[in-house]
Image (cartoon, rainbow, N blue to C red):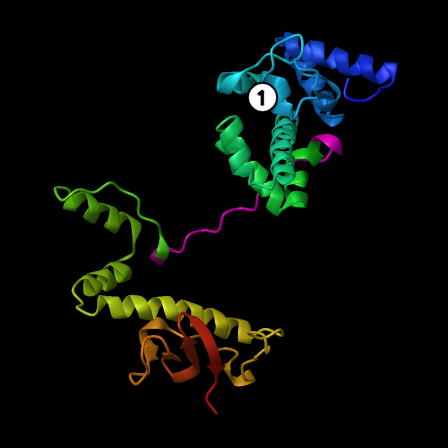
Amino acid sequence: MSKKQSPETNTTIQSQHEKIKQGGQIEEFAEAMAQFCKVEGWKKLNDEEGNPFKSLRHYIEASPPFGAGYPGKSGLERIEAYLSLTPVIKNYFQHCHANCLFEMAKDEGVTPTAVAKREWNDSKGARLAKAIQDNPEEIYLEKAAPYIEGREPTKPPPRKKTIEKCASLRVNITEQQPYVLAKRIIETFNDDFIKTLIDALGNENIDDFVDLESRYNLAALAFKQSKTDDGWGINNITSPPQLKDREPLLEFSTFNDDENKDNRILSLRDKNGLIADVKFKGNKIDILSFPD
């Protein structure tokens, strides 16, 4: 053992270890795995060289009598199949494995991806370990708390519906398939957007309009933030009350022609006229100002 354990604790871990090695009896296996993970049993068992197992996955892959004897990708899939009837335990097992990757990466001063690639080429574990690194509390609540604390699994927030104008278009197209693309465009977008698209395809200044759209999106967001109590930017710039109900429209917004592309001013407008001037410095907003 890696450190002295009470006889009762030692017996319990050994019992869990035996049930995990045997497999097959799904309910008993799942509960044994969950309890084993809860007490970090792999840290209390030794590998063939007499050292504590470095991680849950190392224990899972090691040959009996030392480890559980589920090597490789197929072994991990077999473990998860045993746990499939108890999703909260399956999630908890995945969390413990990913947390081991995270801890190993932290100790070595490398990324979870580097550890996962070196040990098992485990992209799924690496992604979850990176998520634990970025949002440990959130991932704990999602993956571990339902078992540890008896909570209901958290449900991910519903995806926002894609605006029709911005609907994604995924289709493999070759030069011999223009009508496939045309059909997908008709099925995906509304008539007004398709007319705009046709105009854009025939426009020689398409690069200028791409620049306009990208800067407009940044400018419109800054203007929206200026209407909040906190305002926009480090100086908390707020828009005048009379602009509260006005919204800029791309088709009316224009660049001031006398500015170069690295230092441009974009005038946000609606059909009633100027709303705000947004000065860019490179690709970032430098100044947000409003008409008198």
Q: Position of residue 52 (x, y in %)?
A: 71, 21
> Residue 206, relative to residue 235: is it above or below?
above
Quarter holding the N terminus? top right
| Residue placed most toward the observer, 156 or 77 | 77
| Residue placed most toward the observer, 1 or 167 | 1
> Residue 274, relative to residue 133: is it above or below?
below
| Residue placed most toward the observer, 191 or 207 | 207
Q: Residues within 10 Å of mark 1 (few under 14, many from 20)?
A: some
Left or right, 280 with respect to 186, comes to: right
- Which image quadrant is residue 156 in? top right
Q: Which stretch appears magenta? A: 147-165
Tell me the SS state at disc 1: loop
- Which image quadrant is residue 64 in? top right
> Residue 285, relative to residue 109: is it above or below?
below
**Helix, strand or loop: magenta stretch:** loop
| Residue placed most toward the observer, 72 or 188 | 72
- Which image quadrant is residue 248 in? bottom left
Q: Position of residue 267 (x, y in %)?
A: 38, 81
Q: Position of residue 263 (x, y in %)?
A: 37, 78
Residue drawn at x 47%, y 77% as measured from the top left = 286
Residue drawn at x 73%, y 14% as measured from the top left = 16
Which amino acid type is shown beneath numbered disc 1? Ser
Query: Circle 1 sits on which residue?
Result: 84
Left or right, 63 with respect to 219, comes to: right
Q: Position of residue 173 (x, y in %)?
A: 21, 42
